[in-house]
Image (tube, rainbow, N blue to C red):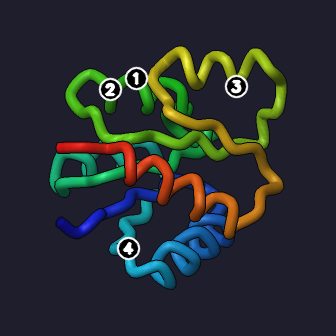
Amino acid sequence: MEHKILVVDDEREIADLVEAYLKNEGYPVFKAYTGAEALEIVTRESLSLAILDVMLPDIDGFTLCQRIREKYLFPILMLSAKVEDMDKIMGLTLGADDYVTKPFSPPELVARVNTQLRRYTW
């Protein structure tokens, strides 16, 4: 099965960078710059994993994670500039499977994606 990945970040440069690294690994990537766009993609596509920024212009990533978790079990990685332990704990408690802080290493992010996809079963 092809692993489709959603990247949600309002900073287009970051979304483009993550997309480039994931596409280099052979993953089809869907990008969204708002929570509303992300929810539309989640309902339309059969995704294998989502990477969510916390600070989005409309819906914060924590709320987006909760909304996705209401219906879907695919892995969710939070990618955020919020580096406090309480932010990380909140993300993981609300349903994220991993939490990566910005600035980040794109190869490390890809390794974390690969790890989550190895564990994810349909």
Q: Quadrant of the C terminus?
A: top left
Query: Is residue 48 depicted above or below 63 in this figure?
Result: below
The amino acid on which the numbered mark 2 sits, given as a three-letter code, is: Arg
Depth check, front residue: 111 or 51: 111
In the image, which disc is placed on residue 66?
A: 1
* Residue at 24% across, 43% down: 121
In the image, which disc is placed on residue 69?
A: 2
Query: Is residue 74 depicted above or below 20 in this figure?
Result: above
The amino acid on which the numbered mark 4 sits, given as a three-letter code, is: Tyr
The amino acid on which the numbered mark 3 sits, given as a three-letter code, is: Lys
Nearer the camera: disc 4 or disc 1? 4
User: For the residue labelled by badge 2, is the local secondary structure a helix, a strand or a loop?
Assistant: helix
Instruction: Give coordinates of residue 78: x percent, y percent.
Output: 58, 40
Query: Is residue 69 depicted above or below 18 in this figure?
Result: above
Instruction: Give coordinates of residue 23: x percent, y percent.
Output: 46, 80
In the image, which disc is placed on residue 27?
A: 4
Residue 87 shown left or right of residue 25 in the figure: right
Residue 84 sits in quarter? top right
Q: Quadrant of the N terminus?
A: bottom left
Q: Quick one: label 1, few (<14), some, or many (20+) residues within 10 Å? A: some
Q: Earlier in the sequence, mark 3 or mark 2?
A: 2
**Mark 1 → mark 3, Cα distance in angstroms:** 14 Å
Instruction: Give coordinates of residue 21: x percent, y percent.
Output: 57, 76
User: For the residue labelled by badge 4, is the local secondary structure a helix, a strand or a loop?
Assistant: loop
Q: Earlier in the sequence, mark 1 or mark 3?
A: 1
The amino acid on which the numbered mark 1 sits, given as a three-letter code, is: Gln
Depth check, front residue: 31 or 34: 31
Q: Are marks 2 and 1 in contact (CB under 8 Å)?
A: yes
Residue 95 shown left or right of residue 1 in the figure: right
